[in-house]
Image (spheres, helix red, strand yellow):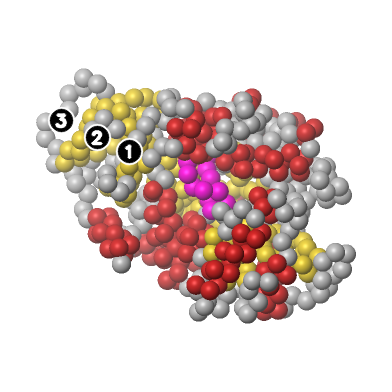
Amino acid sequence: MIRFLLAAAFLTALAAPARADQIVDNVQGIRITEDGSIDRFEALLIDDEGRVKQVFDRGDRRPARVQYRLDGKGRVLMPGLIDAHLHVMDLGLGALTLDLSESTSLADAQGRIAAFARANPQRPWIIGRGWNQEKWGLGRFPTAADLDSVVDDRPVWLQRVDGHAGWANSAAMRAAGVKPGVANPPGGRVERVGRSLIPAGVFVDAAMELVQKAVPAPRPADRDNALMEAQAILHRYGITAAADMGTTIEDWQAFRRAGDAGRLSLRIMAYAAGPDAMVLIGGSGPTPWLYEDRLRLNGVKLYLDGALGSRGAWLKAPYHDDPGNTGLPLMTPSQLRNTLVRAALGNFQIAVHAIGDAADAEILNAFAEVAESFRGDRRWRIEHAQIVDPVDIAKFGTAGIIASMQPVHQTSDRLMAEARLGPARLAGAYAWASIARAGAPLAFGSDAPVERADPFAGLAAATTRTDEKGEPFGGWLPAERVSREAALAAFTAGAAFAGFADKRFGRLVAGERADFILVDRDPLMVSPAELRATKVLETWVGGRRVFAASGD
C-alpha cells in the first residue's frame, strides 16, 4: 500500500504542469561545457519547457522575478547521468521475478530458488536471472539435477547474469520438448552430461531459444509494471536517460503507453532487438523524438558473439582454460555485412555486441568496408569491446567508431578474464584509455541488470581499475584508467552523443533539457571509496523532480 501511494504521488507530480522560469540557486554546480571540459557554477535557470535557460557563476546577477526558487543549500548539482548500455525491461522484470545476482554459492542459489517457489505457489513457471558459476567458485556449469533437487513440480528457467546462457530443470526441458540428442543450433551450444548426448541443463547463446520458446511471455500489464520499476531504480541511482539495447515491439509499446499516459520519466534511446524489430518499430527509418525528448528509436542492436563467462565470446585463439574452444560467432561474415547494409540504407544507427578479440576485429573490418558506401554522421557503435587485439585498437579512431563500454565489467570480470585469456593476451582487455587515445568517442554504461545500474561504481572503476575492496592494489592494468573528468563525460555528454541526443540533454548548457541530480559530495574531489558511496539526494528530468531520497 505504501509503495502504491508513493507511486500515485509520483505520477501526479509528473503529470502536473511545469513551473515557468524556475531557478535552482546556492549549489555547487558541475557541468560539461560545449568543448567537453568541466565548468563550475552556482545557479541554474530553467524555462517553462524544462530547458536550461541560463547558468550563473559566482557574482552573476540573478533574475529578480521567477515563479519558483529552490535553495540548493550548498549541495552538489551535476548533470543527470546517462547509461549508454542497459536493458530497461529486463531490469524491471528482474526486480519482479527471482534475482540470483547476490547468491554466493550453488547451495545459496538453491536456497533462494526453493524459497521463491514456496512463496509463489501460483506461478506456473519459476523464472529469474543472475546466476554466475564463476562467482560461486563452482568450477563447472550448474545442472538440471541441481535444480530438480529443490524444484521438480514445475518448470524453472534462469538466465545467467550476462544473459548469454540459461539454466533449466528437467520439467522445463520436458515442457520445451528438449530431448537427448538435440543438436547444437548455429551460434549456440547445449551443455551435455559427460560425453553423452543428454542435455545437462545449461543452454548457451542461440541454444537458449530451445527452452525460451516455451516460457510464457510477460503480459502487457507485466511490462507496464516492469517499466515503472526500472524507472524508479534508475532514478534512485541518478540516471535520467539510458540506451535500451534490444528493444522488442512489446517493449516499445510499453514505452509508448507510458508516454501517452504521462508516466514516462526516463529518457530512452532505443535500439531494436534485431533487424525485424527495427523495421516493425521504425518502418523506413529512426523515429522522431517523442514525449519531449523522452523516447526515440535510434537504430538496431546486433549480436556478433557471446560472453566470456559462458565461453561464448569469439576469440582469435582458443581459450586459455578451454583449449580447442574459440567461442561462438553468431553471424557469418556475409550475414553481418548484409545486415549492416540493410540498416544503413534506412539510416538506422548500428550497435553491435562484440566482446572477444575476433568479434571486435570482424566488426571493425566490416564497418570499414560498409562505410565506403555510406557517408554522413552514422555514429556506429561497438557494445562492450572487452577484449581487443592491440593491433586493432587504432581502427576505432580511424573509422570514428563509438566504444560503448561498461567499466564495472572490468572489476567483476578481472579474475575470470585472466583465466579465460591467460596473462599473455590481456594487453587489449577493457582498454578504455588506449581506445580513447586512438580517437574513439567513449560512452559508459552498466549493462544492467547484468551489473548494478550504479553509475558511481562505474565512475570509480573507470578511474581506478580497482573493485569496491580496492583490489588489486594500484589497479589492474592501470595504464587503462581514465581521468575523472573523462569518465564523467562518458557517463553524460559522451553517452548522449552516442545516442544522437547531443544538443538535447547531457551537459546542462543553455537550450538543453534540465536533467540534473543533487548529490551529497563532489564526485571529482573525493576518494574512490567515497565516490562509490555517493548518495543521490534528488533526481530531476526536464525541470521536474522525479526522485527524492527519504528524509530529504
Q: Residue at position x 33%, y 32% from top?
A: 76
Along the viewing direction, whichever of 525 and 513 lies nearer the viewer: 525
Residue under numbered circle 2: 72
Q: Residue furthest top?
A: 59
Q: What element carries label 2?
A: loop
Whole-percent x, y for residue 73 in the image: 23, 33
Residue 43 visible, this angle:
no
* Residue at 41% over, 59% down: 229
What secondary structure is the magenta-colored segment mainly?
loop
**292 to the left or right of 407:** left
Identify the magenta region: 443-455
Q: What is the spatial separation of the Cα atoms under label 2 and label 1, in whole angstroms?
A: 8 Å
Estimate the x, y position of residue 355 in percent, counting from the top left. Answer: 68, 45
Tag 1: amino acid = Leu
Q: Which amino acid does label 2 sit on?
A: Gly
Magenta-drawn stretch contains 446: yes
First in sequence: mark 2 or mark 1?
Answer: 2
- Position of 247 relative to 432 (above/below): below
Callout 2 touching callout 1 (CB < 8 Å): yes
Question: In which quadrant will I find the N terminus?
Answer: bottom left
Taking 2 as reference, is 308 left or right?
right
Q: Which of marks 2 and 3 is nearer the N terminus?
A: 3
Gap in Å between the C-alphas at discs 2 and 3? 16 Å
Residue shown at the point (73%, 34%) measured from the top left = 426
Q: What element carries label 3?
A: loop
User: Mark 3 or mark 1, which is nearer to you?
Assistant: 1
Q: Badge 3 is on which residue?
A: 63
Instruction: Answer left or right for 44 relative to 351.
Output: left
- Is 406 on the left-hand or right-hand side of 46? right
Does the magenta segment cover residue 269?
no
Location of the C terminus (image quadrant): top left
